[in-house]
Amino acid sequence: MSHFFGVYKDIKELNIGNVTELGIYEGIFSTIYANMQDTFRELNYYIENGLCTGKRVLEIACGDGGNYMIPMAKKGFEVDGVEISESMIERFHEQTARLPEKIKSRMNIYQANIFEYDTDEKYDLITIPSTTICLLADDEEQTRCLFQKVYKWLKPGGRFMFDYRIDQSLQNEFISHIYTETNKKYPYVLFMQEFNNVVPGRGIVNMYVETMEDGVDKRYIASSDKRIITDGLVERLLEGIDFRLHNSYTVDLTNAKVKLLVLEKEEENE
Ligand SMILES: C[S@@+](CC[C@H](N)C(=O)[O-])C[C@H]1O[C@@H](n2cnc3c(N)ncnc32)[C@H](O)[C@@H]1O
């Protein structure tokens, strides 16, 4: 269910000039995502752990691939991605079309809901970057089943990495400043704001964008509704799965502070 607050609620209710609601990763919002991500500071952690484990990487909920799949393929990793959004997959194909065949051949993207996806492939490294776990953790039993599949998909000694925000809390309501961005190339103007714990336990992002399509003004609005992830929830999700905590990093991104966990599947005994 989408929630709108503040000026976004007003815009939606006024509906001046026909505002269309889209999913946060659909249509123009997939283009905006590709332009605005600020996750490159985590890339080196994934590369470093990939270099310790091996070449085969799976990125769960890989989006348009621009932040991790493509940079990792450029570094020589063989990267598979699973993504639910058709728009994100279109952005992936737009970007990879320009790449040399050698790099393209190292990547496969599959359109699927990760909860319904299965494979016989075995990976050295499996990642869920960009705090995407907050989109996947509403049904704890379902998420635990996903983590069990991740364990099965890993080779012995393989690693599973995912990150979650530690600057959000279940105790405090927090409303961010309005973030604005203008992109003259596409072109669009974007307004975006975070509403944390306004709905208890949820991190909500509202986005509003104005653009031109075929010479016509267009307005779109979107809301994402994410679960606020706590250490306690992560412990519950991993309960009974034989991962060993290998490492944990704290990473400061521009608009968020995250904990990045590195879990390891034990080597089989000789
Ligand atoms: C925050 S983006 C991260 C994209 C990419 N991993 C990155 O780091 O740039 C979250 C992505 O998860 C995808 N997603 C959400 N639920 C999913 C599901 N059940 N199965 C597969 N992908 C999903 C969304 O469509 C979106 O592209």
Image (cartoon, rainbow, N blue to C red):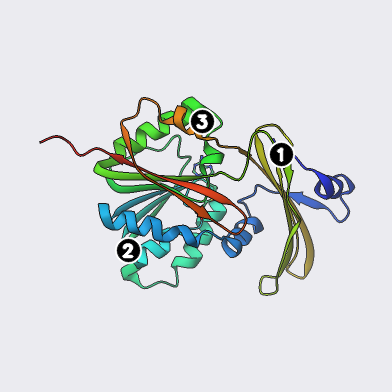
Question: What x and y, as percent, mark residue 8?
Answer: 80, 49
Q: Quadrant of the C terminus?
A: top left
Q: Is residue 169 above or below residue 181?
A: above
**Number of marks drawn:** 3
Q: Are marks 3 and 2 in contact (CB under 8 Å)?
A: no
Q: Which mark is residue 61?
A: none
- What's the CA distance linking mark 3 and mark 2? 38 Å
- Tell me the quadrant of the picture where the N terminus can be found: top right
Does residue 7 sit above or below 201 in this rendering?
Answer: below
Q: Residue at x 35, y 59 (%)?
A: 47
Dot 2 corresponds to which residue? 105
Q: Is residue 29 left or right of residue 236?
A: right
Q: Are the residues flagged by discs 3 and 1 in contact, CB closer than 8 Å?
A: no
**Which residue occupies 50% across, 27% down?**
140
At label 1, the amino acid type is: Ser
Q: Residue at x 60, y 45 (%)?
A: 167
Amino acid at circle 2: Ser
- In 3D space, how far apart are the residues under numbered discs 1 and 2 (Cα atoms)? 38 Å
Which residue matches tag 3? Answer: 233
Label located before the other in sequence (3 or 1): 1
Query: Which of labels 1 and 2 is toward the front?
Result: 1
Q: Secondary structure at mark 2?
A: loop
Query: In 3D space, how far apart are the residues under numbered discs 3 and 1 (Cα atoms)?
Result: 23 Å
